[in-house]
């Protein structure tokens, strides 16, 4: 079993839709949870990170962590064509390296 | 502007050849990392360095080598021993590598292909 799993997509939605991106993980020791956005032929950029469980909101983006289910989510409200990218979830313990999911490819259609 | 610069953007390797990928950062970060990205797979850690003149192997170090002679530079050499080098290589840095999370900042990658 991979440590972090993510549906690769591709996910295609109309402009203005609410997007839900999800990851599951296997190690209950993971404490830090991150979402990166990666445009084609570019490096990943950090969107959000959270420590432990709960929700964190930043503009149109909301990150949600449910440690009891080992489930992390990223919600994008009012999606825009500029949100079209690959979204990588990532996680780490307090003592080990960052583990990345394979990424979900998102297309927002005008 | 502070950031991470990777060069070249595209690189081609002939059989039996070693090639070196450049990574330079002006963020004054102590920690630097090299990742390999293949389609459908997460980023896999090749090598990382917490401080100048020190580096550790990651999960897939075989066929690769690094050096860290200066704080701002962390070049990666893909040797002829790496039999499947075609991939997108990403360099990253963070303030430090310690027990708390320090966000990693990434360069825009080098795409390596076999001729």
Image: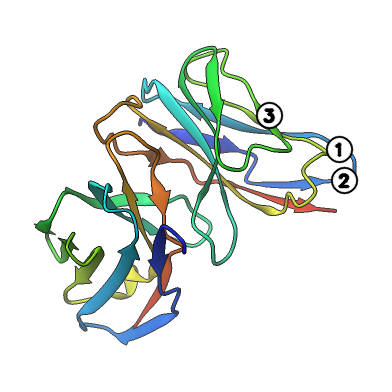
Letter of the chain that mark 2 sits on in the rendering: B
| The disc label shown at residue A52, or none | none
Rendering coords of residue A11 (x, y %): 39, 81
Q: Nearer the viewer, mark 3 or mark 1?
A: 3
**Are the residues tagged 1 and 2 within 8 Å (C-beta)?**
yes
Q: Is residue A24 above or below residue A110?
A: above
| The disc label shown at residue B65, or none | 3
Q: Nearer the viewer, mark 3 or mark 2?
A: 3
Provide the secondary structure element on which disc 3 rests: strand
Q: Left or right of A49: which side holds B25? A: right
Extreme bottom residue here? A14
Rendering coords of residue A36 (x, y %): 34, 55
- For label 3, the crowd category at 10 Å Cα-Cα, with few meaning under 14, some 14 to 19 and many 20 or more, is some
Provide the secondary structure element on which disc 1 rests: loop
- For label 2, the crowd category at 10 Å Cα-Cα, with few meaning under 14, some 14 to 19 and many 20 or more, is few
Which quarter of the picture shows residue B65? top right
Q: Left or right of B27: which side holds B34? A: right
Q: Residue at x 30, y 38 (%)?
A: B103
Q: Earlier in the sequence, mark 3 or mark 1?
A: 1
Rendering coords of residue A21 (x, y %): 29, 72
Q: Is residue A37 above or below residue B79?
A: below
Letter of the chain that mark 1 sits on in the rendering: B
Q: Residue at x 24, y 77 (%)?
A: A19
- For label 1, the crowd category at 10 Å Cα-Cα, with few meaning under 14, some 14 to 19 and many 20 or more, is few
Provide the secondary structure element on which disc 2 rests: loop
Q: Which residue position is annotated with label 2?
A: B14
Q: Which residue position is annotated with label 1?
A: B17
């Amino acid at each position: 079993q991979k440590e972090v799993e993510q549906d690769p997509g591709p996910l295609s939605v109309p402009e203005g839709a609410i997007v839900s991106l999800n990851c599951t993980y296997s190690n209950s020791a993971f404490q830090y949870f991150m979402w990166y956005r990666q445009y084609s032929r570019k490096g990943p950029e950090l969107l959000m990170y959270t420590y432990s469980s709960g929700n964190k909101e930043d503009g149109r983006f909301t990150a949600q962590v449910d440690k009891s289910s080992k489930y992390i989510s990223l919600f994008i409200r009012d999606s825009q064509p500029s949100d079209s990218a690959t979204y990588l979830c990532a996680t780490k313990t307090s003592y080990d390296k960052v583990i990345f999911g394979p990424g979900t490819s998102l297309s927002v259609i005008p | 502007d502070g950031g991470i610069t990777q060069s070249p953007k595209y690189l081609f390797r002939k059989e039996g050849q070693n090639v070196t990928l450049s990574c330079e950062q002006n963020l004054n970060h102590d920690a630097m990392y090299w990742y390999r990205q293949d389609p459908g797979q997460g980023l896999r850690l090749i090598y990382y360095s917490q401080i100048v003149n020190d580096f550790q192997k990651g999960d897939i170090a075989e066929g690769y080598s690094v050096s860290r002679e200066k704080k701002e530079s962390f070049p990666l050499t893909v040797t002829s021993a790496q039999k499947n080098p075609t991939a997108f290589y990403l360099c990253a840095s963070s303030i430090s590598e310690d027990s708390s999370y320090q966000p990693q900042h990434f360069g825009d990658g080098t795409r390596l292909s076999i001729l």
